[in-house]
Amino acid sequence: MLQFIKFCFFAGLAAASNIGARYIFSIVGMNYQVAVVSAYTIGMVINFLLNRQYSFPKGARQIIQEARTFIVVALIGLLLTIVLATLFVFIMQKMSLGLQLNIIETVSHVASVGIVAIYSFFAHKYLTFRKGIREGIKNLIKK
């Protein structure tokens, strides 16, 4: 339980960095999808460093192996974030809520980051900071 609380805290800091960076990138005129990708990358680096140090400090593998798996898991999370954020913007625009585009984009981005955070915890707990993706797949096949 403590591990999950730590993960959520540090993922929250990373998510806040992600969302803050996306907002700044949008203010300076960056394309929304490019801003989401750039912000996600910043959040991913912060997330890896904090969670490796404090949530999963006794990883079973070398840091480079963990980083590789972390990147794969995070890239899947990035794809999910982009798809969900774009989908939520589309849906909210179709709903004609009368909200400004930047508010719709921020709400969509926050919602997508929240959903992807759940996926990320379990993927990092069982893949990144344990035996890796290959071992995880082998264990699934054996069952």
Image (cartoon, rainbow, N blue to C red):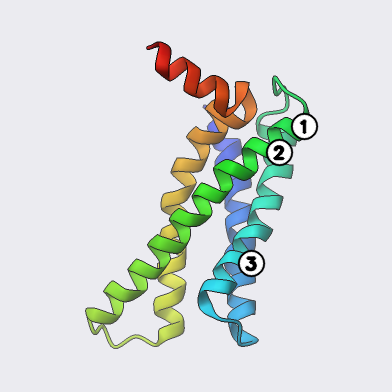
Residue 34 horizontal/vertical position (percent): 57, 73
Other-residue count near label 2 (Cα within 10 Å), few / some / many at <14 / 14–19 / ≥20: some
Quadrant in the picture for residue 39: bottom right
Residue 23 horizontal/vertical position (percent): 58, 76
Question: Which residue does the numbered mark 2 point to in the structure image?
Answer: 67
Q: Say which of 55 and 94 sits in front.
A: 94
Residue 123 horizontal/vertical position (percent): 51, 35
Q: Amino acid at mark 3?
A: Ser
Question: Which residue does the numbered mark 1 point to in the structure image?
Answer: 63
Spot the residue most to the top: 142
The first of marks 1 and 3 along the sequence is 3
Residue at horizontal 38%, vertical 61%?
A: 84
Secondary structure at numbered mark 3: helix
What is the distance, in whole Å, between disc 3 and disc 2 at their CAs?
Answer: 18 Å
Residue at horizontal 53%, vertical 26%?
A: 126
The first of marks 3 and 2 along the sequence is 3
Other-residue count near label 1 (Cα within 10 Å), few / some / many at <14 / 14–19 / ≥20: few
Spot the residue most to the left: 95
- The image shows residue 88, relative to residue 54, as above or below, that is below
Marks 2/1 in contact by CB < 8 Å: the verdict is yes
